[in-house]
Amino acid sequence: MANTDKPLLIKRYASRRLYNTETSDYVTLEDIAGFIRAGREVQIVDLKSGDDLTRQYLLQIVAEHESKGENVLPINVLTDLVRSYTTEVQSVVPQFLAASFEMLRDGQSKLMENMGFPNPMAAMPGFDAMRKQQEAFMKTMMGGLPGWSGSSGPAREDEGEMTPASSDELAQIRKQLADLQSKLSKL
């Protein structure tokens, strides 16, 4: 592929066919999913109107994979997503999902590191503190939801019981979250 710094531009013609502007050929949804799996950003626009259709097509790709039995999203997650469109939680959901996927990517990096591959982010100053803050944020966000235990697996040896310092940190994060929620509700 040509320039991978900018998104791959896919144009949708009136016939609903999708055209790859880099290779000058037509592509399918499965081709687009392959580009994304390979790490490429994709932008899909309507040729006539110029409207950005990327979100619509990405949702269609997810729906097709789910309908083929490649279930990644449990029913309760799908149900919660539907509910989030009709509640005040809607404003928090995008940030929560983004943070969740970031933590998933971080977990994959840790797995690679444990297998002997170095994680370039680990050398960044403050990385460990940032990771711990993310974990505390997730515990705070998910703590009140039914079915969420507050940990992503067995407790690690260094995680013991909550100390007064970590309790203070958690209270501070809760206060920051409450401040953010109040700001969001004012918008």
Image (cartoon, rainbow, N blue to C red):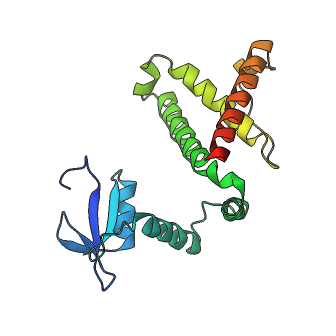
- Residue 76 to residue 136: above or below: below
Residue toward you, 171 or 3: 171
The residue depicted at 53 percent of the width and 40 percent of the height is 102
Q: Quadrant of residue 183?
A: top right
The residue depicted at 81 percent of the width and 49 percent of the height is 147
Can see residue 119? no
The residue depicted at 30 percent of the width and 84 percent of the height is 14
| Image quadrant occupied by the N terminus | bottom left
Can see residue 166? yes
Q: How many numbered marks appear?
A: 0
Q: Is residue 182 left or right of residue 148?
A: left
Q: Which percent across, then down, holds residue 133?
A: 62, 26
Q: Quadrant of residue 96?
A: top right
- Residue 18 to residue 128: above or below: below
Q: Which percent across, then down, holds residue 80?
A: 71, 59
Q: Is residue 104 left or right of residue 85?
A: left
Q: Which percent across, then down, holds residue 153?
A: 71, 37
Q: Quadrant of residue 171?
A: top right
Q: Which percent across, then down, holds residue 2?
A: 17, 54
Residue toward you, 163 or 33: 163
